[in-house]
Image: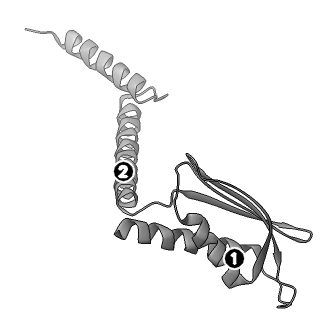
Amino acid sequence: MVSREQKRAVLHEKLQLLRSVTNSNALNKTSIIVDASKYITELKQKVERLNQDIESAETSSQQPQLPVQVTVETLEKGFLINVFSDKSCPGLLVSILEAFEDLGLNVLEARVSCTDSFCLQAFGGENEEEGDMIDSQVIKQAVVRAVQNWSESNNDG
């Protein structure tokens, strides 16, 4: 039979192992067990958060992602609009230019590359006849909307 001293030594050894696994600084048995319980609760919360992250990633991957980055900077006399996609986007330039036209934005200078990727850098000025100031966020939203419409029309066909 195992003596009481041996049982106590084995229990002490297991508590020390539990203490080290849970990064507890406690010295007595009760505190080590309380720390281990808190550690298990934290681990359960982490698992729950990770499962939620996985679920949201799966949900967002099922929705069509816009493959395009859009930035708009306000300059002294106009706007600098950058649109970039790491893949070629046939027809996207037309959609974006139509969005500019709808806003009354004149493209004063533009550089476009459509070979392996899509890159548009356009300097636009407001139509002086209209007189209203256009906000950079309005331009960005219009370009993003044009990209979404382009993306939807290309996914349907």
Q: At which x and y percent is residue 13?
A: 31, 15
Residue drawn at 69 percent across, 80 percent down: 101
The amino acid marked with disc number 2 is: Ile
- In the drawing, what numbered circle is on residue 100? 1
Near-viewer residue (42 or 65) = 65
Q: At which x and y percent is residue 43?
A: 37, 42
* Residue to which mark 2 is pinned: 54
Relative horizontal placement of residue 115, taking residue 8 as reference (left or right): right
Q: At which x and y percent is residue 129?
A: 85, 90
Eyeballing the image, is 148 above or below 14? below
- Distance in Å between CA atoms under marks 2 and 1: 38 Å
Residue drawn at 37 percent across, 55 percent down: 52
Residue drawn at 57 percent across, 48 percent down: 117
Q: Quadrant of residue 58?
A: bottom left
- In the drawing, what numbered circle is on residue 48? none
Residue drawn at 40 percent across, 60 percent down: 60
The amino acid marked with disc number 1 is: Phe
Query: Tag 2, which secondary structure?
Result: helix
Q: Give the quadrant of the N terminus.
A: top left
Q: Give the quadrant of the C terminus.
A: bottom left
Eyeballing the image, is 101 above or below 53? below
